[in-house]
Every structure is written in C-alpha cells, then in structure tokens.
Amino acid sequence: MSLPGPSFVSGVLYGVNDAQRAGDARQALIEQVKVKTSIFAADNLITWDKTLGFIREDAFATAVNAHTRSGPERAGVWRYHTLVWAARQVAMLDGDFVECACYRGNTARIVADLVDISNRRYFLYDLFDHDETMPHHSMPAHSKTLYDEVRARFPEPNVIITQGRVPESLAIASPEKIALLHIDMNNAEAEIGALEVLWDRVVPGGVLVLDDYGWLAYHRQYSAELDWFKARGQFVLELPTGQGLVVKHG
Ligand SMILES: C[S@@+](CC[C@H](N)C(=O)[O-])C[C@H]1O[C@@H](n2cnc3c(N)ncnc32)[C@H](O)[C@@H]1O
C-alpha cells in the first residue's frame, strides 16, 4: 500500500449505521468536488480544496507508509501530521518526549524517523496486554509478546519503554523535563492521572497532544480535561482530527 497523493481517501468509517451506504454517500460527494486532487476523506473527516501539504512531504509519506500496516492505522495520517508538527515545533526546546500510551509504537516510530531524537530521550508507556478487568477497550495486537515486539522497533538506546499501568508506572521511569507529551489511553482516569504527574514537568512552549479529546466516544476525557486545564488557565484547542492541543504557557 502506498499513500495516494495529494488526495487521501480511506474506506474506514466509524460510527455509521450502514458502512456501504455511508461509503456510497461519500463517493457521491467526491464526484461533485471540482478539484479531485485535494480530497481528504479518512478518520471521520472529509475535506476538499485544502492543500494537504503534509501528504505532499515525501519523508512524512514514507514514514507513515513504513510504520502503519492496516487501513485504520493509515487513516490516522492527519493525526500523525499533528504529532510530527508538535515534535518539530519543540525540537529547539530542552526536554524529553513522552507517549502514554504507545500500543504498537506506530506514532512514536513515525516521529522518531522524522525528528532527530539523538539529544533527548523518548519515554513510551503501555500495558501492552489486556484483560477484562481493565476499564479501557482492548486493541487487536495486545498480547504477552507485544512489549518485546515494540522494543524491537526501537533499537535506539534513548527510547525507554515501560510496561505497566499509568500513572503508577511513571514512578519506574519518567523524565524531569518534557518538551512533547502525547496522551492516548482512551481512559479519563488514567489520562488525568498522567497529567497530574507530568504536566508540571512540561517546559514553557512544550506541546501536549491529547489523541482522543474531541472524539464523542471519549466525551468523559473531554469533560475531565477541559475542566482540568481551565483550572490551570490553559485552554485545549479541539482539532478537526479529534485531537486536543495545548501549548504550555511561557
Ligand atoms: C489507542 S492505543 C494507543 C495508540 C498509540 N498512541 C498509537 O498512536 O499508535 C491505547 C493504548 O492505551 C493503553 N492503555 C490504556 N490505559 C492505560 C494505562 N492506564 N496505562 C498504560 N497504558 C494504558 C492500552 O493498552 C492501549 O494500547
């Protein structure tokens, strides 16, 4: 599979009654769009007449193609752009990169391919496995071997991967200064727990990306995080991708 560019149309649709009819409706809309080379339809986001500069960047397209393996994974391409933007934006700042939680390591791998991390550490956390007592949903690759599989994707010694439940696992290994914080646990309590420990360590100008913030299915995270940041005089930008974005006050 390779990214068609500059348009990007994915067959993956979430939250619809009839995927076939919804796909036909999307196709009917696309047929009415005059400029066919600038259509984005993926991850429940349809746009046209937008530049889509990120898809036109060869290095970005190569990294996304190399490190995603399924339609749903590749459909997150605009979200990957947000994260890569954030990593590039903070590249001049002191501080490590953090992802709670990394799952298969796709987004961290894409970032590490595109941004020089040789002068900082990249801390990744996940449970890597699932059982029915856990409050969040399972993912297809969860298994007893996933930690080792993710470890093998990061030969860099400065990528530190910790298996366990956030926020408790942050006590095993976590940085004192953070330039980039990516939170994606589909779980309001764990995400607020991570913020309680990590937000004060984000350096001024550092960037936080909340992957699930604007997705209706995760409205508990939206409410909890909106209030948590308001109480600190910071405001979360809800992006059309469903992500939330916060830049730490200077
Ligand atoms: C949607 S996936 C993360 C995807 C990843 N950020 C990416 O972009 O490829 C959510 C992950 O959160 C993990 N998770 C949920 N609650 C957690 C917790 N309290 N501590 C550690 N990991 C957790 C799950 O194991 C799952 O792998």
Image (spheres, grey):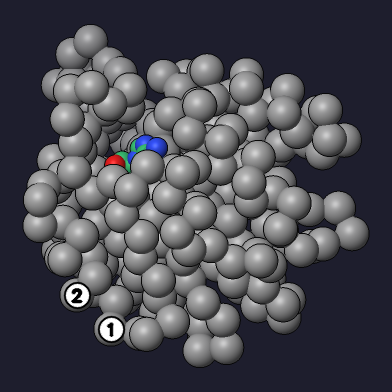
Residue 9 in sight here: no
* Point 24% across, 43% down: residue: 72
* Point 32% across, 36% down: residue: 31
Position of the C terminus by quadrant = bottom right
Q: Is residue 101 left or right of residue 207?
A: left
The quadrant in which residue 238 appears is top right
Mark 1 and mark 2: Cα distance apart in space:
6 Å
Q: Which residue is mark 2?
A: 152
Badge number at residue 155: 1
* Point 59% across, 66% down: residue: 175
Asked whether disc 1 touches disc 2, contact meaning CB atoms under 8 Å apart, the reply is yes
Q: Is residue 91 left or right of residue 124?
A: right
Q: Residues within 10 Å of mark 2 (few under 14, many from 20)?
A: few
What element does badge 1 sit on?
loop
| Amino acid under disc 2 | Ala
Q: Is residue 10 left or right of residue 51?
A: left
